[in-house]
Amino acid sequence: MVQFISHNNGRYGELEGIGLALQGGCRWIQLRMKGAGKEQFFQSAVQARELCKQVSAKLILDDRVEAVLGSGADGVHLGKEDMPVREARRILGPDKIIGGTANSIEDIRRLVADGVDYIGLGPFRFTTTKSRLAPILGLEGYRRIAHQMAEEGIDIPIVAIGGISSGDIVDIQNCGPFGIALSGAVLNAEDPVAEMESIIRICK
């Protein structure tokens, strides 16, 4: 399970990056444009949805619950300071995907109780694509949380996120049943399409 999270790295814009990730075989995209205005974000969401639709990929919007229904996106990812999960579910209904950000087993318990469909767990290491970074987990943090989840019988898709490169994937997956979310590892590669293809192969 691989999720590509868009960002503008100066070389590629958000939509360009999404197009490259889709060409490389990724079928789960998160549109993330923290500084964008409402109209700019919505128009980008509509365009991203069209790109995803062409290859039957899922599109998740970061934070912007109000843009999901109008753009035709498949769901939303909510950070700790975004709209509460229960409120987003009330607006979006039962069929849209809602993901939430976690940094600890306490976060995971809360998000599961609130009814998320998946959890983005991180950061794995320092990343420049996100400000106000939570405490870094590393491999030991992932092992600890996977063990706690197993002990408590918590069964929900977990996606590792935060500064992950292709060389980290096998070690992370050995820590538990984690999917992988990447951004810079793809966009900063010499050939982003080939890099995504390689990542997809590693994750299978």
Image (tube, grey):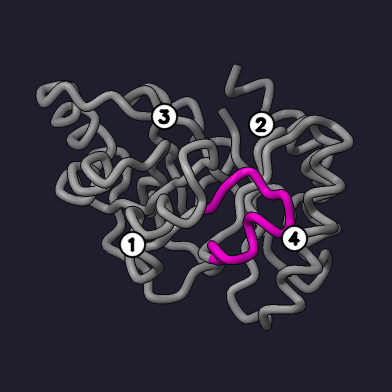
Which of the two labelled residues, at mark 3 and mark 1, occupies the earlier sequence position? 1
Image depth: mark 3 or mark 1 in front: 1
Residue for badge 2? 199
Determine contact: label 1, label 4, CB under 8 Å: no
Q: Which segment is the magenta one?
A: 64-76
Kindly identify which numbered label has been placed on residue 84: 1
Which of the two labelled residues, at mark 1 and mark 2, occupies the earlier sequence position? 1
Of the residues shown, which amino acid type is indicated by label 3? Phe
Of the residues shown, which amino acid type is indicated by label 4? Ala
Quadrant for the N terminus in the image: top right
Between residue 14 and residue 46, name the one nearer to us.
Answer: 46
Q: Is residue 16 magenta?
A: no
Kindly identify which numbered label has been placed on residue 45: 4
Q: CA distance from mark 4 to mark 3?
A: 27 Å
Residue for badge 3? 178
Q: CA distance from mark 3 to mark 1?
A: 24 Å
Q: CA distance from mark 1 to mark 2?
A: 32 Å
Which of the two labelled residues, at mark 4 and mark 3, occupies the earlier sequence position? 4
Q: Secondary structure at mark 4?
A: helix
Density class for disc 3 (Cα within 10 Å; few <14, some 14-19, many ≥20) is many
Image depth: mark 2 or mark 3 in front: 3
Of the residues shown, which amino acid type is indicated by label 1? Pro
Residue, x 19% and y 29% (percent of image)?
149
Density class for disc 2 (Cα within 10 Å; few <14, some 14-19, many ≥20) is many
Residue, x 57% and y 47% (percent of image)?
75
Residue 44: percent from the left, percent from the top? 79, 65
Which of the two labelled residues, at mark 2 and mark 4, occupies the earlier sequence position? 4
